[in-house]
Each structure stands twice: as structure tokens, then as C-alpha cells.
Image: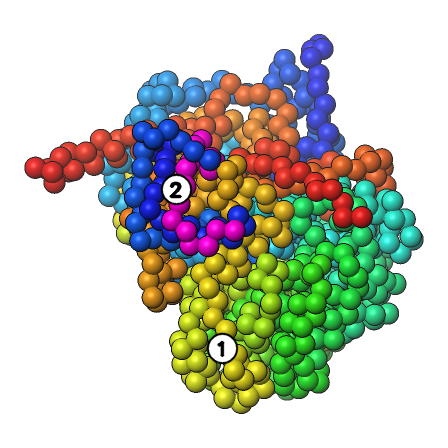
Amino acid sequence: MAETMLLVAGRTSKQGTSLSAGKLKEEYLGVTSTVEMNADDMTRMGLKDGDAVRLRTSVGETVVQCKGRKATDLPAGMLFIAYGPPSSQLMGSDTAGSGMPLSKNFTVQVERAA
Amino acid sequence: MPDTLRIVNGRVYDPANGIDGEVRDICISDGRIVASLPQDAPRLDVNGMAILPGGVDIHCHIAGAKVNLARKLQPEDHRRDPHPSTAVTRSGTGGIVPSTFATGYRYAALGYTTAMEAAVPPLAARHVLEELHDTPVIDKGFYVLLANNVFLHRLLREGRREEFRNAVAWWINAAKAYAVKLVNPGADELWKGQRNTNISSIDQTGTGIDLTPRQIIRSFIDVVEELGLPHPVHIHCNNLGHSGNWQTTLETMRTAGESRLHMAHIQFHSYGGEPGKNPTSKGPEIAEYINTHPNITTDVGQVMFGKATAMTADAPLGYMLRNISHNKWINADVECESGCGIVPFTYQEKVYVHALQWAIGLELFLLSKDPWRIMLSTDHPNGGSFLKYPRLIRLLMDRDFRNEEIQKVNPRAIKKTVLLDNLDRQYTLNEIAIITRAAPARALGLKHKGHLGAGADADITIYEENADKERMFNAPRYVIKDGRMIIADYEFRTDHEGRLLHVAPAYDAAIEQKLHPFFDDYYSIEFANYPVADSYLHHHEIVPPVKAAV
Amino acid sequence: MAENIRTVEHATCTFCGCVCDDMNLTVDLDKHCITKAENACVLGKAWFAEHTIENRPAATIDGREVGVDEAVEEAARILVNARFPIIYGLSDTTCEAQREALAIGDLIHGTIDTTTSVCHGPSGIAFQGVGESTMTLGEVKNRADLVIFWGGNPGEAHPRLFSRYAVTTKGMYIPNGKKDRYIVSVDVRRTQSTPVANLFIQVKPGADFELLWALRALVRGRRLDPSVEERTGVKLDTMKQLVERMKTCRYGVLFFGMGLTMTRGRHFNSGALLALATDLNEFTHFVAKPVRGHGNVTGADNVVSWTTGYPFGVNLSRGYPRFNPGEFTTVDTLSRGDADAALIIASDPAANFPKAAIEHLHRIPVIALDPKATETGKLARVAFCTATYGINVGGTVYRMDDVPITLRPAFESPYPSDQEVLTAIKNRVRELLNKKAKPKEARKAA
């Protein structure tokens, strides 16, 4: 059963260092293919670190690995992902006349990837 | 375009060489004016036209960090005034703060070939140099802001005069500046460090730096004189824009004694009345002081009705204007060196204060006896755009036009001035050539500019004579820069990269040992990365020091 | 072991907008690499270590290795024949290269946009609306006794912002560093930056504008409806305490990140924050600063502004600059399908743009300049491998606070610089346009 959650995309230092190595390299692709999730949410959904989850928006979908964070660090219902090709798949292109697509705080459907 | 040209049949206005409207040949070779050319040299017949040296703007704000902030701030203003590219020139946008390319072309199209950016913190020197590089046609330079420099204050406070002189010279070199600019001396610490307060007197103590403005001003006047810089201290006094500030202005001039001093945009400093209340005019009193003190030069900073933008290193002034206009506002603090305030502003005929400011500017022009010491400026874009110069020239040359314009403005303001008291002076074309060319070049110490004698830069403007002086000065028929025909028959014929003018006073390099630790402690960039490299200079010319007056 | 070692002092790291210029680099000239970057943060260390000379072709056309001249020719041909060419990227290259890109835009009547449009573009729009009270970073170091970080994670994205400029560093009136400052962090989640804060305020996602507006109201002494607590997730008492601190500090700073610009509200969020900083100047000295990402994105803003009057999203199709975010910004020109050619400099939209925009990049001829292999380079018709700015190439970059700094390159690259490639393209474009124009003139004459 897919749950609705809020996805925040942002930078991390690992993304930054692997970016310098090369954006087509494994490390960068790995960093940008990991989504952080509230640990309690993961337990409820029967997920553990490293499990594959499918994120879906009206625009597209992507499959990434999940990683648990304490509830004090990441509130329930919130996801964090480092920018990269997987997060691009989920982003709408409407900029509401600003030039900026919504890149943080957008709702996604989350489910275990088969 | 040939390297040589003989311009024939034009009336020449070259006040520096005592030529007032005589028909003479002007000969050009290799970018310079020469005494003669072979008879078979190419000719340009300018019968019925007036030949003047290229205009020299001694005080404007056209490039650098604050200008770019003001540019970015006003898209609505650019949209009204696009500047299309041509086969030979770049595109841009105009309005009150034009893009760099548009600035260069528009100055040229006005017959100006030199302009001086009047306020640059040294930390932003690279920025102004990059923008000036992208400002085509005209020659240009900039004045470096030093009056609120924390390290220099420290030396002054400790009485280290020798080191002070060396540090001033070091800073001029580090920035590649042309002159020293003082803005609201001593006020930055109050603004940044004491809850946005300001200085109100030239002898104020408790400024947080243990120096009065007068001490700072006098020290800079002495040092600039000792260094023999071609242009004296260029000062924006304390209390700009405040009612009753004329006393500060007089005291500032008195501080100079008999030393040279350039008073920037003096109109903004000629107000009577009580602080916080409506101003009155002290134009006549200020003009009288200038008339009787040949060491003082000034530019007027005329207010022209319509759109302007206040942009100034006098940050408290910017905030005061913001609280008057309630417009969008920029404040930009520059560590250890300066501040900055920017507010879009519109001067309106019917508003008492604006009409008074306009009238005081005209009083100053009309009451000044020596055109060699009062120069035309609007403090662009503070009092209005440089594109308003032709209209200002008409106000000065055409009494009937002026009197018509006076009728349109707030009558209460006019009554506070002497404009209608038989002030019927009309500037001659020769006098206009002085206040827009010869005088600023002389005040700047630019020996090759502002005149048409042999050896001068071949920067020449040729106007069709017209009874309507605004129309005449709005569009020269020919503009020649460094001997190249830039504009012919009102159209751009070629692009051109002007020169960067700067000075390089000598100093004892030992001062760097004193500067270095200060930078390590209080600056956010490395001392080694602070001085600007020669690579930023594009075409440039180092103007040599003059013999010190003492 | 290589003997050919050189050191470069006072070098500049261009990875992020901090543009730290105190790097001491050790360079192995034989191996063409930087072996040590003293003073660099974790991001800077990777930046210097990873930019070596890779064995990549200097230029390719459709993946086929070609000479640089041939690639320049093809690039110029594409740009001259396009009806709606766009130029994008520019934030990771020198101002000197950016100026050449602007000159090309003028010639081809193209559309110029930079990565600003997907970074602090909304802050640029807000700036146009309300202005900004701001400062150079040295003022923060010397004076700031209250520093607020809002919607950003400098601890990971700008690691030395804290130590070099804003938190622990000592300054003229802040002799004890962090002890003399009060640090506040406002974010939707705890991050690596949170521990530095004396006060952490967790705002509900998407409620930044409401919280900022509530603070503005409190600064002006207005009463607030208690429902604001539910809306923002922040207690009224917390807001009041923060407002009291803001009004009574000597020198207050608001740093803000893309937590404001990339989320619901976009430029309204940035505008609310800038307005809050402005309001506070009635009580004390207060400034704000968007924390900028790429090394020279601030330079790109400056160059595009001084050339066109507008900071990004500029269209030159009518022979003069027009500005309209949402119309001439790159996500829009691509995802609407307007652009029919793209010149992309030092940026990788194919990896981080919305899906619809990336799909269009696959449909049109793309010219890409980048020191590294990227998704954009992979799909490009013409791809140039260029030398890395700050490592192989000198020039100018602007720090996030508009302070310009000159680069000190460490070692030479066999690849041309962005500036060199762009100058060559510009010159060839001019020649092709002249050729194109000539037949028309001939017809006119006839």
C-alpha cells in the first residue's frame, strides 16, 4: 500500500564530494539514489535500511534505496533525498512563472519496490 | 577610417586655448590633435557646425558593485527603454541606470568621451574595472572610497602620519584608482555599529572611532597634496541632504584652508533651515564662498525633474531617503571600508523640496563667477540621468526657457531663492564648453583632455548649431574618439574600447608589513589576493603626479 | 616518486559560494594533480583532488572524437541556424568566460539564463521587489552578534561558512567568536547544521512565509491570532523571544537558503525575509544574505546584470534584452519545447532538471562545455572537455557577497578554457552571420 509523504531534496556533503569525482560515477549515483526516511515510518511499512522503495508523483517515478533517520531528525511523513537524476524524475516542470520548479516539499507516493 | 583627418569650416570652441567660436581647421593624426597636416590629408567639412572637445564628466555613478545592485533592482525601468544592438554595437538596456554597454554608447552619443565613476570601495575595485572594461567608447576612471577606512582611521588616531600617507598611496595602487573620494567622513561606524545613527557635525566627537570628521578631512587633503595626485580630494561632505547643512559645507571648505579641494554635488550641500524641517536656499552664500576661494572646485549635482536613483556610499542618507519615499531600499555594508545606500527616487516639480533643490542648483550655476571652478553634473543618477545634460544646458543658456520652466514648479520654493531677482545670466557656448569640458579636464589634471590644442587626445564632438540648445546638445552629428570616427551623421560607425585612467603614487612598501596582520584579523579575503592585478586594466594610462602645491 | 612539486599559496576554491581564497595547494606537476589542499573543507578537498587531467577527447560530435576547430565550426553552425537558441549554465566558470557567452547571445539573438534560475532566482525576483539590506562576509565576522540561518544546511553545503565567516570566527567587535554570538537555525528538519545553533526552530514544511510574516507583524508590535502556532508549528512565545533578540542585537544577520526558494511560496518567501531584515533596521542594524551555491553563480548574476540590466532569464530575440522569469528561464524554455538549440556551459541540466525539460534536451542539438563527463555531455551533439576554472584556468569569480576574487591556477591543462572555446565560437558565429547577411544586402542593392 503506497503512503503519501513529503519529499525534500537538498545537498549533502557526500553528494558534493562525489560530484567532484564525477557525476557518472558509481558513488554519485549511489548517493543520489538513497532516500532518508523517518525510522518509525519505515518500521510501520516493514522497511529496513537498504530496501528499495518506489517514489511516485504525477510526473514520474523512481526506485531508490531507503535509509532510516531518527524521528527527532526527520519528522514522520518526511523524506529527504540528495539532488540528482532520481529526484529529477519526480519533479514537475511548472515554475508558476518564476523559473523555479518546486524542488522541495512536494508530495510523493511511497511504497516498497517489488 | 584614415589615421589622419582635417576638419574644416567649423566654429571651434576651445576655451583652454582661448578660442571662442573662430572658424579654424582641426587636424588629427594617430589619435592626437596635431598642429598641421599635409594639404592632401582627408577632409571633413563641418560648415555651420560647432566643434568642441569631447565632454568630460567629473562625477557620475556608472559602474561597479552599487551601480549593478541599482541596475538589478529596477527591471521596470529598463523595460521602458531598451537599447538594441546594431551592426557595430552591443545591446543593452537604458533607464536611469543603464547597462554598461548602453552607458558607454549613450555618453558617446551625447558627445562625452570621458567619465569618472565617483565612488568605489577598494574591495570592489575588480568589479568596477570589469564593468568599465565593458563600458565602450569613453575613457574612464574611478575614485576610491577611503574616508571610512578602519585601518586608516587607526593610523590617524595613533598619529602615524608617515604610515598614513604610505597606506593611502598603497590603497590607491591596490585599487587602480584615479582619485581619493571621501564620503560622509567618519560616519560608517555609527551606521553599522551604533544602530543606524549618523554624524551631524564636522566636529562631532563620540563617533566610535575617536576622530572627528574634520580631522579625517584635513589629513586626506594634506596627504593627497603631498602625493601630488592630479585631482585633489573629492569630497561628499557630512550631512548631505539635511536642512541647515550649509554650515557643514562652509566648515568643510574652511578646513581646506588654501589647499585644493573638490566639493562634489554642492547643490545637495547648500541648504538652510533647521534639521528635520523644510530646507531653505543657501545657494548664494555657498556660491559667494566659492567665488572668493580659488582653491575650491565643485560640480553642481543638479536635480532634474523625473526619475532618479539615489546611490551613495552615504548609507544613512540612503536610509533617510527610503523613509521619505518608502520605496524599495538597498543597504550594502563593505567590511572595514564603506557602506552603501540605494533608493529609486522621482523628483517632482510641485514638491517644495524637489523644486527648491532644482532651483538651488540653478542659483549656484548662475551666481558662480568662475566657470572654471563649477562643473556640470547631475551626480548621475542621483539628481537625474546624464541624458538630462542637454536640457540643463538649455536652462543655463536660454533665459526665456528657464523662466518658463520656473513658472511650472512649486512657487513657494522659488520664492525662497533669488532665481527671479533679475538673475538673467545666460551661459555662452564658450562657457558651456568650459563647464562640460575644459574645467573638469583641468580639475582632474588631464592635460590631454578638454581642449583641442596640439598634443591633445583627438576626442572631439561636432554639433549642428541650433537655437534650441537642448536639441543641439542632444545629438552631436560627429563624435571622434582617439581620432576614430565613432559617430557620423548621428549613427554609430564603429565600436571602440576606451582607456582606463589611473594614478600610481609612490609609497614605501614597508607599509605592507603593517597592513598584512590587519587583513588577517579583520578582512575576509587574503591580503595577497586583495590588490588588483594589471590584467584588469585593458587599455590604460597612468596619469603622472603633478608637482605638489607646497 | 615525482620530484616536480609546486606549491600555490592563497589559491581559491570555487566549489561553493564561500569562494575561500586561503588554500595552500601542493601540486604534482608530473601527475597533473593536486596532492594536498591545506585549509580546504571536505568539499574543497574533493574538488581539488578529483580535478586531474582525465583522458577524454577535447571535443566530440555525436560522440565521435574531433578536433576543437571542427567542433567549434559545428557549434557555430548550430547556433546560427537556430531560431530559438538558449545559453544556460555559467555559474561554474569565470566572469571572463561569462562575458563571452553574453557576446554570443547578443550575436545570435539568443536567450541567456544561468543556474540562478533554479537556485536563488526567486530571491533575485524578491530583490527586485523589496530591495535588500546586505553586507560582505567580513562584516559578519567583525560585527554580527545575532546570526540566523533559515532554510539551509551550510554545515553540509557551505562547510566553512561557520568557521571562516559567520559563527566561530573572531572579529573586530566579536573577540570571543561563537561566545559573542547567538545562533538561530530555522528549518523543517534537523540537519548537520542544527547543532551549531543556540536555538533551533522547526517550522512546518511550506509554512516559511507564514512564520516570516508573523515575525514581521511582531516586529511592528501587532497582535497575532494564536492559530499561527498551528499553522507554522512554532510557539508564539518562541517567536516573541526571537523578535526581542532581533530588535536588541547590535548587528543581526539572516542567511537564507533554498529551503525558501525551492518550496511553496518561492519569491514570496525570499521577499518576506528580505522585508523582515529591512523592517528591523528601524531598531538596529540588520542585514540578509542568500547563501549561494556554485563557485561563481554570483559572478554570473553580476555579468548578466551589467550587460543586460537583468540578472537571469534574458531573451535577446528582438535585438535587445527582455526579462521574464517563467518565460525565458531554462526549465520553461525546455519543458515548453521552445528552445531549438542549447549552448550549456559548466552545468548539467540533464541530471537535475525536471523530466519534461530533460526530454526536450534529447530532442534538440546541444553544445556542452564541461571539464567532467556529465549526463548533459552524453546527450550533446557537440561536447567540449574544458580546463577547470581555479585549478587550470585563472580569471575572476564573485563570492556569494559580491566580492570579486582573482584565481590562481595550480597546473596547466591540455584542454582549452571555457573562455577560449566561447571566444572561438563567437568569432566563427560572427563570420557566419556576416556571410548570411551579405546576400541580403546584395539583393537590396539590386
- From the top left corner, tell me how far across and down residue B454 is, in percent: 50, 38
State left or right for residue C1 relative to residue B379.
right
Q: Residues within 10 Å of mark 2 (few under 14, many from 20)?
A: many
Q: Nearer the viewer, residue C131 or B460?
A: B460
Find residue A99 and report its image quarter. bottom left
| Chain name for mark 1 | B
The numbered mark at residue B25 is: 2
The numbered mark at residue B424 is: 1
Q: Is residue B184 magenta?
A: no
State left or right for residue C192 relative to residue B89.
right
Find residue B482 and report its image quarter. top left
State left or right for residue B110 relative to residue B296.
left
Q: Residues within 10 Å of mark 1 (few under 14, many from 20)?
A: some
Q: SS at mark 2?
A: strand
- What is the C-alpha distance between the residues marked 1 and 2? 34 Å
| Chain name for mark 2 | B
Q: Is residue C182 above or below residue B5?
A: below
Q: Nearer the viewer, residue B229 or B498?
A: B229
Q: Give the range drawn in magenta.
A: B18-34
Q: Disc 2 marks which amino acid?
A: Asp
The residue lying at 51 percent from left, 26 percent from top is C387
Whether residue C399 is visible: no
The residue lying at 63 percent from left, 13 percent from top is C30
State left or right for residue B540 relative to residue C425.
right
